[in-house]
Image (cartoon, rainbow, N blue to C red):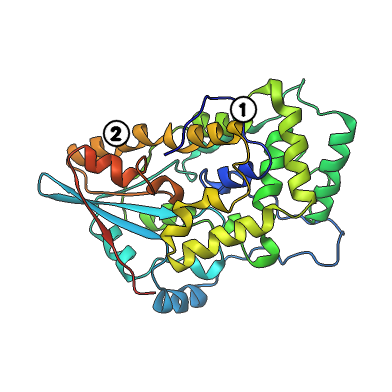
C-alpha cells in the first residue's frame, strides 16, 4: 500500500492527518477566551438533557462499521473521527445495537481513565530545552490569539503539542470541535451502559507520535505553522469530516490523492508509521480480547480501517469472518 523508509516526524498538513488518527480530546483547550478576533467560534457547550433526548431520537448512523466473527462470537470494528460536530455525537441505531451486543468497548486510549489522563498531562508538558526560536514562538502566539485563546492557555505544554492543539481547532468555525470527538462520547456511553472500557494503546505511544524526533522539532513547527497560516488545514479537516459523515469510504481510502499531505517520501514514510506500523498491534489486541471470550466493540480512527493494511483486512488474514455493516444514509 505505502512504502518508504522511516524518516521524519509529522510535518505540515501531515499533522492534521495524524490528528484524524490520534484522539484529539488530548488537545481540548481551556474554556477561557482571549478578547481577540470578532469571528471567534462559539465555545463548545455540553448538550442539555432535553437536547440529548431529542438528538438520540433523531440520530443516524455515521462513520464505518464492520462485524467480525470467530469461534461463534461477533465483535465489531467502528471507524470514528476525533474532531466532530455536536449533532454527530450520539450513535445511530446500528452502531447502538453493536455496542449493546458487545461486552466491552475498546478505544485507542480511554481519555476518561484517571491514570491515563495523568500520564497524558505528563507527556505533553514542555521540557526546559524545548522553547522554539523567537520568530517561531511569535508565530505560535499569533495563532493562539487568532484561535481566541489567552496567550498563556497553552504555555505549559510543549511547542509540538501547542501546534497539535491549534491544528485540532482549525475547523471550529465550521462546527468541528475536539470537544465533540466520537471517541469521548463512546467512553461516556460505555460507562452509562456499565461496559468496561479498554485502551488498545498507551498514552506514551500516542504522545510519541505527536512529539516526534526532537532534532527536527523546529522544522516540523515551521511547516505546521505555515499550513495553519495559509489556511490549508481547515479545508482538509472539513473534507475528511464530511466523508466520514456521509460514509464515503472510497474517499478516505484514497485520501493521499487529495489531502496535500503526502508530497514527499518523508511524508509517505510518516503515514506508514502512523497507520500501517500501528495496525498489526491493534489487530492483535482486538483478536486477543475476542479470543479471550469478550465480544468487543473496538472504535479507532477511521483511517485505520481501509486498504490492505487496514484492520478489517488484517483480521480477515487472522481467520476472522469480516463483513461491512451498511448504513442507511
Horizontal side, residue 319 vs residue 113: left or right:
left
User: In this orientation, which residue lies closer to the viewer: 29 or 134?
Assistant: 134
User: In this orientation, which residue lies closer to the viewer: 325 or 113?
Assistant: 325
User: In this orientation, which residue lies closer to the viewer: 10 or 260?
Assistant: 260
Residue 87 visible at all: yes
User: In this orientation, which residue lies closer to the viewer: 121 or 243?
Assistant: 243
Q: Is residue 304 above or below residue 156?
A: below
Residue at the spot 33% in from the left edge and 63% down from the top edge: 95
Image location (x, y in percent) of residue 21? 51, 45
Rounded to the nearest angstrom, the CA distance separating label 2 from label 1 is 26 Å
Horizontal side, residue 77 vs residue 149: left or right:
left
Which class describes the residues within 10 Å of circle 1: few (<14), some (14-19), or many (20+)? many
Q: Which residue is mark 1?
A: 8
Horizontal side, residue 32 vs residue 16: left or right:
right
Residue at the spot 85% in from the left edge and 67% down from the top edge: 38
Query: Which quarter of the picture shows residue 60?
Result: bottom left
Residue lying farthest to the left in this orientation: 72
Residue 119 visible at all: no
Image location (x, y in percent) of residue 129? 77, 20
- The tag earlier along the polypeptide, 2 or 1, is 1
Q: Which residue is mark 2?
A: 284
Q: Nearer the viewer, mark 2 or mark 1?
A: 1
Q: Secondary structure at mark 1?
A: loop
Quarter in which the N terminus is drawn: top left
Horizontal side, residue 60 vs residue 29: left or right:
left
Q: Return the mark for residue 87.
A: none
Query: Which quarter of the picture shows residue 93?
Result: bottom left
Query: Which quarter of the picture shows residue 92?
Result: bottom left
Amino acid at each position: 500500500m505505502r512504502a518508504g523508509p522511516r524518516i521524519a516526524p509529522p510535518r505540515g498538513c501531515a499533522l492534521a492527518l495524524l490528528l484524524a488518527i490520534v484522539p484529539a480530546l488530548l488537545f481540548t483547550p481551556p474554556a477561557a477566551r482571549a478578547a481577540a478576533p470578532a469571528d471567534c467560534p462559539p465555545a463548545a457547550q455540553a448538550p442539555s438533557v432535553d437536547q440529548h433526548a431529542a438528538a438520540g431520537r433523531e440520530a443516524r448512523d455515521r462513520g464505518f462499521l464492520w462485524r467480525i466473527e470467530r469461534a461463534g462470537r461477533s465483535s465489531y470494528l467502528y471507524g470514528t473521527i476525533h474532531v466532530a460536530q455536536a449533532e454527530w455525537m450520539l450513535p445511530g441505531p446500528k452502531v447502538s445495537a453493536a455496542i449493546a451486543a458487545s461486552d466491552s468497548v475498546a478505544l485507542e486510549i480511554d481519555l476518561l481513565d484517571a491514570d491515563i489522563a495523568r500520564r497524558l498531562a505528563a507527556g505533553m508538558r514542555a521540557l526546559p530545552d524545548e522553547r522554539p526560536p523567537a520568530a517561531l514562538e511569535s508565530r505560535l502566539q499569533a495563532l493562539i490569539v487568532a484561535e481566541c485563546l489567552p496567550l498563556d492557555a497553552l504555555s505549559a505544554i510543549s511547542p509540538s503539542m501547542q501546534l497539535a492543539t491549534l491544528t485540532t481547532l482549525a475547523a471550529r468555525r465550521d462546527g468541528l470541535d475536539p470537544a465533540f470527538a466520537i471517541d469521548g462520547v463512546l467512553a461516556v456511553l460505555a460507562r452509562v451502559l456499565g461496559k468496561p472500557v479498554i485502551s488498545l494503546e498507551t498514552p506514551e505511544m500516542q504522545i510519541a507520535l505527536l512529539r516526534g524526533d526532537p532534532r527536527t522539532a523546529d522544522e516540523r513547527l515551521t511547516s505546521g505553522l505555515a499550513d495553519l497560516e495559509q489556511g490549508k488545514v481547515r479545508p482538509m479537516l472539513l473534507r475528511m469530516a464530511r466523508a466520514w459523515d456521509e460514509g464515503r469510504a472510497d474517499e478516505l481510502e484514497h485520501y493521499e490523492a487529495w489531502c496535500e499531505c503526502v508530497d514527499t517520501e518523508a511524508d509517505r514514510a510518516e503515514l506508514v508509521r502512523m497507520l500501517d506500523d500501528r495496525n498489526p498491534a491493534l489487530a492483535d489486541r482486538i483478536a486477543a480480547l475476542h479470543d479471550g471470550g469478550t465480544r468487543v466493540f473496538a472504535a479507532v480512527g477511521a483511517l485505520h480501517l481501509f486498504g490492505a493494511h487496514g484492520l478489517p483486512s488484517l483480521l480477515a488474514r487472522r481467520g476472522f469472518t469480516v463483513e461491512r455493516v451498511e448504513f442507511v444514509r
